[in-house]
Structures are given as structure tokens and as C-alpha cells.
Image: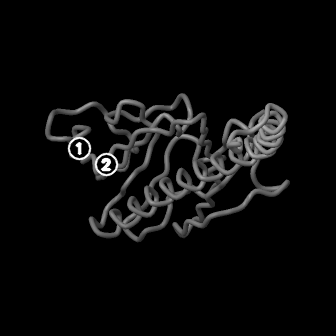
Amino acid sequence: MRANRGVTLIELLAAIAILAILMTAAVPALTRWSDGNWLTTGVNRFHRTLALARSQAIEHRGNVVVCKSSDGRNCEATGGWEQGWLIFLDPGADEQCQDGDADARCDGDGGLIIRAEQGFAHGLTLRGSGNTANAVAFSASGFSQGYPGTFTLCSASGEARGLVLSMQGRIRLTHPSQDELHCPP
């Protein structure tokens, strides 16, 4: 007689039931882990943007502005930071970057676009509080020009990460708490 090498229907159903129970527990944890990774990546990316703008202001000995921009050429007062942003040298200190010509100059006073960044995907939203709602400017000394505030990056599930910008131009990460970061429902 030969020994059977297969599995019975009952053994197969038991294995599928165990796998279904494990997947029910694993999928929400995987989603939270994925959201957390997107948030960490996003907040680090925006932190690098602000640090670059500050260092460029010091290096060029002039004003550098970071503003919301969906097209990478013009500052916008509507929408959130998640649509994208623009970093430009602002010698006229008017904090406006108007559509320019092909050599990446953005306005008549010689404002030069340093970098244009695309926004966030994956349902992330980025909002600035107070004066940081639309733009941030750094002076030649690296100080933020009247722009202290908090940037809050939120996932679709309501998880948050934040950046705090001081008047001295220092940028620090902040973690969610009931008093600091609030995501819109």
C-alpha cells in the first residue's frame, strides 16, 4: 500500500481559517505602519525644504521665500501646501514670484527660482498655522521674517506629524499631542 501525501479538506479549511484570522489582525497594523512611513517621509521632505531655503538665504545674503505653488512657477494663496511649493530668491522682498521666462527667473526684480517641488500623494495634507499658511520668508541672517508657526502634516486616517518654525529660523520636528497638532476631520 502507498501512503497518501495530500491534505484533507478539513486540514485545508483549518489552515484557511487561521490565515483569515491572521490577515484580519495584520491589515490594520500594516495600514497604520504605511501611513506612518508616508508621514515621516513627508515631514522630513518639508523639513529639508525649509532648511534649504534658510541656508540659501544665508549663502546669497538675501531674502528667500518658500510659498505654496501647484505649477512650480507662481505662488498661490489658495489650497494647501500639499499641492506643491516653490523656493525662490526674493531680492525685492515682496514675497511674490510671478510667472517668468525660460531661464527660471520668476519676476521683474530678478527673483530666481531655486527649486520647485511637487506636492504630496497618498491623501496627505499639509497646513501651516498663522503666518505660515501661505508662505515663509528667511532673511540673510537666516531668521524667519515674522513667520513663527507650526506646519501639520496629516494622513487620511487622522495621524499627524509636525514642524515648528521659530522666529530665529530654527526648524524642529514635533510629535502629535492633544494640544499641538490637529488634523481636520
Name the spot of residue 103 as percent of width and height, x first.
14, 40
Rate crowding at label 1 as few (under 14), some (14 to 19) or many (20 or more) other CA atoms within 10 Å: few
- The residue indicated by pointer 1 is 109
Q: Secondary structure at mark 1?
A: loop
The C terminus sits in image quarter: top right
For the N terminus, give its image quadrant.
Answer: top right
Which residue occupies the foreground of this view, 31 or 23? Answer: 23
Amino acid type of disc 2?
Arg
Judge by depth and name the residue closer to the eye, 67 or 24.
24
Residue under pointer 2 = 115
For the point 79% across and 37% down, the residue is 20
Mark 2 residue element? strand
Measuring from the top left, give residue 44's x and y in whole percent: 52, 58
130 left or right, relative to 23: left
Depicted 45 relative to depicted 13: above or below: below
Left or right of residue 146: residue 13: right
Tell me how the rendering is colored. one colour
